[in-house]
Amino acid sequence: MRLSRYFLPVLKETPSEAQIVSHRYMLRAGMIKQASAGIYSWLPMGFKVLRKLENIVHEEQAKAGHIAMLMPTLQSADLWRESGRYDGYGEEMLRMQDRHGRDMLFSPTAEEMFTDVFRSNVTSYKDLPLTLYQIQWKFRDEIRPRFGVMRGREFFMKDGYNFDLTKEDALHAYNRHLVSYLRTYERMGLQAIPMRADSGPIGGDYTHEFLVLADTGESEVFYDSEITDLTFGDREIDFDDKAQCQAVLEEFTSRYARTDETHDEAEFAKVPQDRQRTARGIEVGQIFYFGTQYSDAMGAVVQDGEGNKVPVHMGSHGIGVSRLLGAIIEASHDDKGIIWPEGVTPFHCGIVNLKSGDAEADAACEAIYKSLTALGLEPLYDDRSERAGAKFATMDLIGLPWRITVGPRGLKNGVVELTSRRTGESEELPPETAIERIAQIYGKVSG
Amino acid sequence: MRLSRYFLPVLKETPSEAQIVSHRYMLRAGMIKQASAGIYSWLPMGFKVLRKLENIVHEEQAKAGHIAMLMPTLQSADLWRESGRYDGYGEEMLRMQDRHGRDMLFSPTAEEMFTDVFRSNVTSYKDLPLTLYQIQWKFRDEIRPRFGVMRGREFFMKDGYNFDLTKEDALHAYNRHLVSYLRTYERMGLQAIPMRADSGPIGGDYTHEFLVLADTGESEVFYDSEITDLTFGDREIDFDDKAQCQAVLEEFTSRYARTDETHDEAEFAKVPQDRQRTARGIEVGQIFYFGTQYSDAMGAVVQDGEGNKVPVHMGSHGIGVSRLLGAIIEASHDDKGIIWPEGVTPFHCGIVNLKSGDAEADAACEAIYKSLTALGLEPLYDDRSERAGAKFATMDLIGLPWRITVGPRGLKNGVVELTSRRTGESEELPPETAIERIAQIYGKVSG
């Protein structure tokens, strides 16, 4: 993309309404614009990252054998009356009536809808296990929305639901979700720690939240420092293998890690003192086994091997996709702006032309732009006739992980500058070598 | 995808509520399920096609230089009061109040939102031309929703808005949209004819609807038969080249083609009689230049080259993405089911195992499945232990364009059967040759 043809409305001043760094940078980098309280328009660069996150979630869910579908945002109140949640949900549920006076609502979550799709179509244990999910806009009418996309009212969320014959199978689905979530967050450049969560009014022992450590996190967290040494890495996993998934669960959840909601001082004291850590964390996902609560209430039963009708065991599993943008920025920035992890960056590399209008510099930039594009990469080429300082400030603010700087002086020596946004380190290299380096970083085969 | 692990709830009976073939087949093939009147859940195979259509639209918009972003579904009433449309829109607009009693609505279209984003960020003619678009869920509270996704209440739509300094530039944007839409529909296997449309209460001469010919179309259409010989094909186009885009517009709109709304008997009579056609058509898109209507009302002005503040010339351009599923099926089916065009098929090829459980047949299917997957294709392998007739009926109903049938008898002679869904013709081929054929059809390099 050539910046002169893009729509990147960067702000020079820091918006006064933004209290946390991710909100400030998302506004300043022209990623979002508030439409009304807690509701945002996703400007082109914000939408681009949102779409990348969505695609990563889809890819990792597919690997785990989970099946994507899509529910409408607007739902009839009837299903929610059946589950008993319509009256109980409170003011966070946005309710309305259509022109015929029928009660409707904007979906804040979708247990009822998925359970209904299931019970309408599945009657035999032979069709299990089954995990269906969607990534869809939800609405919760927060009384005091704040922190930009971190606590908005309209938000983009992945919510998945497993349907299994037995508790044991459902717990395997639980583990499968844990594994797939670990992979998902790592691909996004995040370390998200599964922490034992509070199951709330629903009850049940099986629920973990995934927390990203960041100073601005809404939760206080307590953990054994060994946990931050764990990484999923590129190990192969067979999602059908119960023992393998269970082993991952144990590896990632056996050490102490809890939020203030479930914190237990006595348990925490057993962690060797030099490994006890407290910090703040941002919740970016949650997995939950809740048994037959909804299948009982809504009659989601299947015939088992003996011909008995039994309610299915269910769980629900969520990732806050729009919230993740905020979490990634909270976890990865400096005082100049965002620092995107390579897996989610809106553009793979910036190209800064130090002297737009100079024939040689223009030609060199153009050639680099075309080479990177031909490799299947998306560079953002700052071809505007701005001064160099302004171009660098914009690149630092929007946080592309790599920048190639092209100027007449370097070109005389046959070199351009390759700069890492994270370390700030620069190297002078022939253009071809810089391109090759970028190609390697993103796993593309160059020339 | 192995069918035994997929969620494809095929119905044996024809649902009585479905009056047109696309609605019937989408229900029977397990693509959608009605959630409430005019509101559908997109089951996995329906969602898969919807996502493919969405991606095609994104790709073609990017080629035309248009920039994707995303507006919230819920909007404050204030902007609509500013444009004067809040009170005028009538009962099709779904209105609600949030917990603080603020008037909100579910976006039926987004002229106001895009104009607001534009005026908040763009002040100079130097930032033009600019075309922004989104693909987002919309809601219109149709009094009598019907025909499945063809006239639903919640629908998925691409809506784009151009902002230009002059009428001439805006008409180039209009032409660019026409060209990109022709390409988009052709990639989806559709012939969509641009027809002069009625500009409605807004007025203005420049608007075309795109209509797909189908017996169940809601509009009567009148056209010169020469028009159906036109195809865009794979010609290269430079979207910045005004003359080139204008030439395409003239080529595709100079012959008579109108809906009943704009039909003119006297003009139609000038078409040679043997080329006069009447038929029915489904509207799948519309382009529209409306000048400065919204920019005047909402103060969307830029400084021109002389320092004068002038309102921008705008247009809006839409593609009904969810409706397209219905239109494609209306245009491409037979009495056994859907016939997907290759460009939008949910799976590239079906594999039918005539004797699941037979070691040789299982191994051959598995090998074909793996080869196709390795080529980057998505086969749907019917690995269930159903009888052959039921498997064929399912494959015909869901309409994958190609089917490979594997059975013990053929394997003894070293062949499988490759069948075209469209022609019904079958060929016996060695498995490698069948795979190669499929690879060629989808432009993949085999072995």
Image (cartoon, coloured by chain):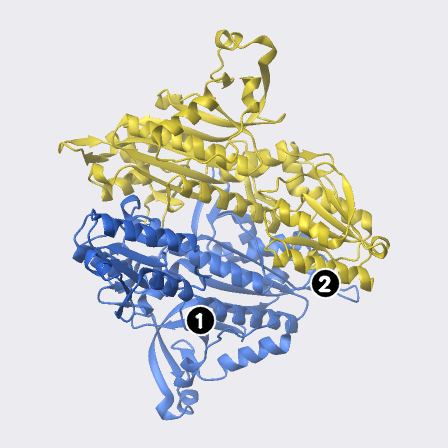
Chain colours: A yellow, B blue
Determine the image quadrant of residue B397.
bottom left
Please tell me if label 1 and label 2 are on a single chain.
yes
Q: Quadrant of the C terminus of chain A?
A: bottom right
| Residue B18 seen | no
Residue type at mark 2?
A: Tyr
- Residue B234, horizontal then vertical, whole percent: 51, 73
Q: Please, which chain is the residue tagged with disc 2 on?
A: B
Q: Residue B444's spot in the image, x, y percent?
A: 45, 61
Q: Give the residue at mark 2.
A: B125
Which chain is disc 1 placed on?
B
Residue B409 visible, this orientation: yes
From mark 1 to mark 2, how far is it between C-alphas?
31 Å
Relative to B36, residue B319 above or below: below
Question: In this picture, is B48 found above or below B425?
Answer: above
Q: Mark 2: which secondary structure? A: helix
Task: Please tell me how crowded label 2 is: few (under 14), some (14-19), or many (20+) other residues with Cα within 10 Å.
Answer: many
Identify the residue at image location x=59%, y=22%. A280
Q: Which residue is mark 1?
A: B210
Q: Secondary structure at mark 1?
A: strand
Please give the name of the residue rendered at 35% of the width and 64% of the height, measured from the top-left corner.
B433
Comparing B197 with A373, the one in front is A373
Q: Amino acid at mark 1?
A: Phe
Compared across the picture, whether B134 is left or right of A423 comes to left
Q: Position of residue A361 (x, y in %)?
A: 80, 59
Does label 1 or label 2 sit earlier along the sequence? 2
Q: Is B401 placed left or right of B442 in the picture?
A: left
